[in-house]
Image (cartoon, coloured by chain):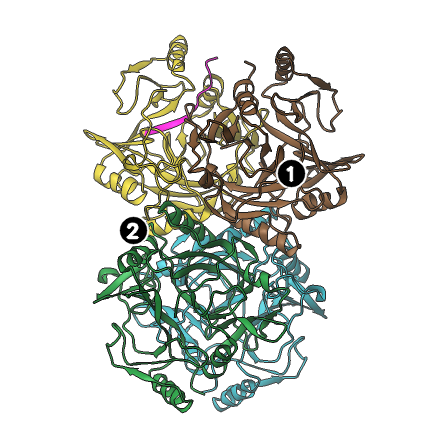
Chain colours: A brown, B green, C cyan, D yellow
Amino acid sequence: MVDKLARFGHIALETPDLDESVWFYRDLMGLREVERDGDTVYLRSARDREHHTLSLTAADEASVDHVAWRTQTPEDVAAYADKFETDGLDVRWLDDGEETGQGEAIRFEPPGTDQTYEIYYDVEKPGTEDGVPNPLLNRNYSLTETGRVNPLRLDHVALGVVPADETVDWFLDDMGFRMNEYIETDEGHKIGSWLSVTSQSHDVAVINPPKLSGPGLHHVAYYVDSLEDLYDAADILRENGIEVDGGPGRHGGTQAEFLYVKDPGSGHRLELYTGAYHVFDPDWEPIRWGEKDMMKALLWYGDPPGFDTTPF
Amino acid sequence: MVDKLARFGHIALETPDLDESVWFYRDLMGLREVERDGDTVYLRSARDREHHTLSLTAADEASVDHVAWRTQTPEDVAAYADKFETDGLDVRWLDDGEETGQGEAIRFEPPGTDQTYEIYYDVEKPGTEDGVPNPLLNRNYSLTETGRVNPLRLDHVALGVVPADETVDWFLDDMGFRMNEYIETDEGHKIGSWLSVTSQSHDVAVINPPKLSGPGLHHVAYYVDSLEDLYDAADILRENGIEVDGGPGRHGGTQAEFLYVKDPGSGHRLELYTGAYHVFDPDWEPIRWGEKDMMKALLWYGDPPGFDTTPF
Amino acid sequence: MVDKLARFGHIALETPDLDESVWFYRDLMGLREVERDGDTVYLRSARDREHHTLSLTAADEASVDHVAWRTQTPEDVAAYADKFETDGLDVRWLDDGEETGQGEAIRFEPPGTDQTYEIYYDVEKPGTEDGVPNPLLNRNYSLTETGRVNPLRLDHVALGVVPADETVDWFLDDMGFRMNEYIETDEGHKIGSWLSVTSQSHDVAVINPPKLSGPGLHHVAYYVDSLEDLYDAADILRENGIEVDGGPGRHGGTQAEFLYVKDPGSGHRLELYTGAYHVFDPDWEPIRWGEKDMMKALLWYGDPPGFDTTPF
Amino acid sequence: MVDKLARFGHIALETPDLDESVWFYRDLMGLREVERDGDTVYLRSARDREHHTLSLTAADEASVDHVAWRTQTPEDVAAYADKFETDGLDVRWLDDGEETGQGEAIRFEPPGTDQTYEIYYDVEKPGTEDGVPNPLLNRNYSLTETGRVNPLRLDHVALGVVPADETVDWFLDDMGFRMNEYIETDEGHKIGSWLSVTSQSHDVAVINPPKLSGPGLHHVAYYVDSLEDLYDAADILRENGIEVDGGPGRHGGTQAEFLYVKDPGSGHRLELYTGAYHVFDPDWEPIRWGEKDMMKALLWYGDPPGFDTTPF
C-alpha cells in the first residue's frame, strides 16, 4: 500500500453569492483572505499552515468543487495516481499553480460516489502576518487581534454518501484511514463512520443516517479553543442576525462540543468544534453504536443538528 | 412602605416519590441533606448560608407548599404582617420552630394568585462541614469534594401566574422589587417579568407566556460557577440516565446560560444557571421586549426550555 | 444616617503620558473613548451605564485626582454635604457640567487620608452604539465586536491608606458600607478590609499590608466574564509587549480570579477580575483572617500581585 | 529504520513513602488504582486505554525506575532490540508478565544518559468500570464521578539530561521522533527540545536549561479538559493543604496552560496540562527559540515552574 495520507487539507466550495459568502467566512468567521484569483477567494484560519484551507468560487448554485487530502511525501502523489489508475479510476493531473498556491496534484472520483477528491503535497506555506514575527515564535497569526469568531484551524469534513458502505471501505482499505467510531444498522450498514489518518477522532465523517436529505456536503469543521469560544461564536452570530443551525450541544460520538451555522450566501454548513478526544493507540478498537444507541452518538445533549446537505 | 425584602430564601416542594426526589437533589445534584423531620427533608447547596434553601415533603402529588422571602430585619416580619392585614390579606403566623431551622414567620396568599408565600427573618445559619473550618475561611463547604453537580447557591424562582399583571404590580408596589426586564404584549399585558430586590437580574420571574400550560411553578434555579460546570452538569445527568429538559442555551433576557432538568420523583423543574448581569444602578430603566422580540428574550440560542408547570 | 451609597462610580487618574495611557485603556483594554475635553479623556466599558467610569488627565506625574461614589437619590448628595460639614470636613461643590457628563457633586477628603473623594447622583447615561439598538435589547455595546480585552464593567477600587483603621471605620459608620472580609493583626489593626454597599464581595478595598509601599492607589478593577477571558487578556497583553504585573491567580479573600497589569503611560495598576461571590444575606458575618492566614487571603494560588502604589 | 514508535506509554516511579504517594495520585489526583503487586501499585487515568500509565514502587529514595514507549506493532519490539544491539547498547528482555499487565518488552539505556527506557507492545487493555458499559460507549470510565482532579489521560514526560544534545539526536534519528520546538544557545546547544511521535506538540521534552538542578525527571504530565479544570485542580490541592509548585500559567513553547505539583510522598513533580497545539503537517518546520526569547518559551505568563529534578 502507498503510505497513508497525512491529513485533510482543504475544501473548495461554490457559492451563488460570493460577496455574502466572503462576508460570512472572512468578516464574521474571521478567516483571513489570502488571495483572490478571478472568481475564487482563498482563505485560511489563524493556525492553518497551508496557503488555504477553504476556497470560495462564484457559481450558479451552491456546490462542492472538491475535497483535498495531503500526502506524507511529494512522491506519494504519483504513487496514488498509479494505484488509482490500476484500480480503474479516472485520474486527472493538475499542473503546478493550476490551483493557486499549490503544486502538482491529482483529482479523481472515489468508488461509490461521484464526488471529486484531490491529492496533493506541494503547497505554499503562510509567512507571518505582514512578514513581522509574532512575539510567540510558534504563531503565524495573532489569536487575539479580532473580535470575529477566529477559529484556530481546519479540523474535518463530513460527507453525505448514499449508500455509504463502499466509500467507507475505500477510505479504510485504499487510503489508510482508521475507523474510530461507527453507527451500524441491524442489517449491517454503516450509516455513520468517523475515520482518521491523524490522531483526531475523525478527519472525515461519512454519513447516511435515516433523516439525511441525500448525498453531498453535510459540513466542514473548524476547531475553536474552548467552550467559551463556542458560546462567544453563537453570540457573535446572533448579534449579526445569523440563525444558529444547531447547537450549542455535544455529540456522544467523539464527545465533541459543536455549533452549526450556514453561510447565508451559499447554504453550506460550517461546524465550529471543540473538545473531542485523540487516538494515540496503535490498536484502537472501533466503537460500535447500534440502532438503539444511535441517537446518543449523534447528540448527547443540546440543540440538535439538521440533516440536509448541499450538493457535492 | 416597609423595608424592601432582603432576598428569595427557600422553596418547599411536595413530591409523590420522596426517595427518588432525594436521590435527585442530594445524590445527583449534590445538595447537602441538612436535616430530616418526619416526611420532610431539608437541603442546601455549598455556598447557601441558611438552614435550608429547599425542602422536600412526601405528598400524594407534586406541588409547591410555599415560597419564602427573607426580610432585612427581624422587625420587618411583623411590619409586613400588619401591612398585609390592612390590605385585607389573610395572614397566618408560624411559631418559632414550626418550620424546622426557622423562627417566627408569616404565610399568606398574595393578590392575583392562590399560591402560598412566606416571610421570615430568623433562621439557623450553617456551621462548617463537620465543624471543621475550611482552609478558605470564607467557605463553609468545599466546592471540590464531590463529583455531583454541586451548584454554588440558590438563585431565583420562576412562577407561572395567569394572568400575571396584578401579581407583578404587587411585587413592585408592595414588596419593594425592581423591574429589570419584561415582555409586554401589544395589548399591554406583562407576560414575562424579571424582578429583584437584590442586585441580581432577577430574584423572581413571573411568567405567563402563550405556550405556558398554566399557573404554578416553572422552575427554581441554583447558580453554578461557569459554562464548563453547566456542561459538566449535563454530562453527569446523561451518564445517570436523566434527560435534559432544555438547554444548554442562553436566554436573551438576563443574558444567562441555562440548563433545565426535572426531578424524576416529582417532575419539578430545576434550572442550573450561570452568567447573567447584575444591576447596581439606582436608576435602572427596565428593558422592554415587545412581541416581535419576545422569542429572543426567552432564547438567544440553544435548546429551548419547555413551558409546562407543576401545581402551586 | 443618610441613605447608604449606591455604588462606586468612577475614578479620575492623572498620567504623565496621556497618549500612551489612552492607547493602553482604549486600544489595548478596549474601553470606549466617550468624550475628550481639553487634556482629559473619558472612557467606559461595554456594560457600564454611566457617562464614564474612568477619566485620564495629562499631568506632570501619575496620581489620582478623585474617586467618585454614586448616591441612591439626587437628594442624598446635599444630605451628605450637610453631614460632612457637620463632621468638620471641608466640602466643595462642583457645578453641573464642571465634570463632563455629570451634574452637581461634592468633593472632600475623608478623615484619615488626604485623598479626594466625590459624591454625585446626576450623570448622563450612555445611549446605544451609534444610536442603533443592539439586537439584544439589554445591551448597549456589543460584547463581541473587538479583539481587545473588552472587560464588562467597572468593579471596585483598592486604596492604600496608612494607617487604615480610621478610614475603614469611616466607610462603615458614615458611608453605610458592610464589612465582608478583613485581615487583622494580632494587635487588632485592620490591614486589609473588603467593604461594599452593593452585593459585591467588595466595592472598595482599604489595604495597608506590611509590604505596601505607602498610601495611594493600589488598583482599579474591571470585571471580565470568565477565566478564559482572563487568560485571553494575558495573551493580548503579552502579544503587545506588556508585562503582566501579577496573576493569573486567585485570591483567597473574595475567591476571585485576577490579573494585574500597569498602564505603561502612568504606572497605575489595573486589575482584571472575575468570579468572586455575592452577599445577599442581611446578617452577613464578616470573615476575619488572622496573621497566620493572611497570605491565603491575599493569594490562594498563582503569580502574586505587587505591593507598590501610585500617589493619591 | 524500524517503524517510528507509537507513543509514550507509562512511567515507573519509586517513592520512599508509598502510602503518601498513593494518597496523592489516587485519592487526590483521582487516578484509578488498577492493581497492586507486592510493593508496586499500578494506576491509570480516566481515558487511558492501557493497563497502567503510572506505577509506584516503595524504595529507599525517590527515583525513576523506567520510562516506557509503545511500538506500532508487536514485531517492532524485537526490531528495536536488534537495532540497539547493533548500535552497541545493552538490551535486556523482560518476560511476559514480568511487568504486571504487560507482555514481553526490552529495557536499555539510551546513549548520553544512564536512564532506563523500556519498549513494549503487548499490554492488557482496561475494561469498563466494574464491567458495566458507560452510557457513552466511547468511555471506559466516567469523567464525572469524582471530585478529585481526575485528569483525562497521560500526556508526556520531561527529562532532564545534561548535556542534552546527544540524547535529542538519538530520539530524532533512532526513534523516529519529530522536533517541534527547541531552545538553542548561541553556542548551538539544544537546552530544551519538544519532540513527538504523535501529533502532540511533545510526547517527550529533553531539557537542560541553565537553572536546572541536574539530570533526572523534571515531570510527568497528565492532560485535563479545560482551563476551568486546571483551576479546580489548584483549588482541590490547596483545600488539601498541598502547595502548588508552579502555575497556573502558560508556556510560550507549545502554548499550553499548566499547573505543577509535587507528590508529597516522593517529591516527583506532576504537571496538569491543557491546551497546546497539534501538528498534522508532514513538513513541520521546527520552531527555534534563541537565548533572547528563551524565557518566553518557558513562561509566557503566570507563576513560573521550578527547575529541580528527582533522580532517574
Residue in the foreground of this view, choosing between A264 and A283:
A264
Residue marked by disc 1: A133
Label 2 neighbourhood size at 10 Å, few (<14), some (14-19), many (20+)? Answer: few
Q: Which residues are magenta?
A: D1-11
Q: Nearer the viewer, residue A122 or B87?
A: B87
Front residue of B166 and D7: B166
Left or right placement of residue B272 versus residue A52 in this view: left
* Residue D2 is inside the magenta segment: yes
Whether residue D286 is in magenta: the answer is: no
Q: Is residue B223 left or right of residue D146?
A: right
Q: Secondary structure at mark 2?
A: loop
Q: Quadrant of residue B22?
A: bottom left
Instruction: Please name which of the two marks, 2 or 1, marks the residue nearer to the observer.
Output: 2
**Residue corresponding to mark 2:** D240
Going 54% across and 62% down the picture, which residue do you hit?
B298
Disc 1 sits on a residue from what chain? Answer: A
